[in-house]
Amino acid sequence: MPIDEKNLIRHELNGLDVTVSECLDPSKKGICGTIINETQKTITIRTKEKEKQVQKKECTFMITIPSGIIVEVKGTLLYGRPEERIKKRLPKKWDVL
């Protein structure tokens, strides 16, 4: 099943481009790059300078899916192990730009 804005959280995020649009830690806001690793609580982003790790629960992400659509995802929806997200209920509405 291809990744689209409706099933994004049911897929692995590694390799997707991402920007941190909101974060409780102001130093993390605006980080952009490619997701290279995902754990239960964090996402590791490779930027031009180095790799940076951000907490999922603290941030809102703008993720670019392969079709070029940018999807805004609250980190709380991504919280948990990637393999366990399949079991989560999806919210009724997604913010698609």
Image (cartoon, grey):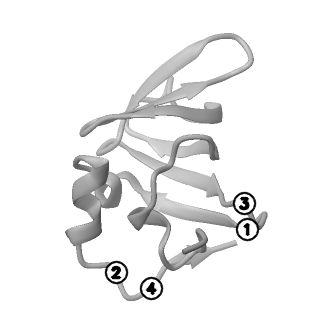
Say which residue appears at 43% left-offset and 23% top-offset: 53
Circle nearer the N terminus (2, 3): 3
Say which residue appears at 34% left-offset and 54% top-offset: 78
Residue 50: image location, x then y, percent:
62, 11
Circle nearer the N terminus (4, 1): 1
Say which residue appears at 63% left-offset and 75% top-offset: 96
Q: Is mark 4 on a helix, strand or loop?
A: loop
In the image, what residue type sits under mark 2?
Pro
Marks 2/3 in contact by CB < 8 Å: the verdict is no
In the image, what residue type sits under mark 3?
Pro
Say whether residue 63 is left or right of residue 24. Answer: right
What numbered label is drawn on residue 91? 2
Marks 4/2 in contact by CB < 8 Å: the verdict is yes
Place residue 97 in its image quadrant.
Answer: bottom right
User: Residue at label 4?
Assistant: 93
Say whether residue 49 is left or right of residue 60. Answer: right
Q: How far apart are marks 4 and 2 (CA)?
A: 6 Å
User: Residue at label 3?
Assistant: 66
Q: Is mark 1 on a helix, strand or loop?
A: loop
Q: How many other residues sit within 10 Å of disc 3, few (<14), some (14-19) or many (≥20)?
A: few
In the displayed structure, 65 sits above or below 41; it is below
Which quarter shows the N terminus? bottom right
Q: Distance between the residues labelled 4 and 3?
A: 20 Å
Residue 39: image location, x then y, percent:
31, 35
Q: Which of 63 and 83 is in front in this view?
A: 83
Residue 63: image location, x then y, percent:
60, 54
What numbered label is drawn on residue 69? 1
Circle nearer the N terminus (2, 1): 1
Say which residue appears at 37% left-offset and 38% top-offset: 24
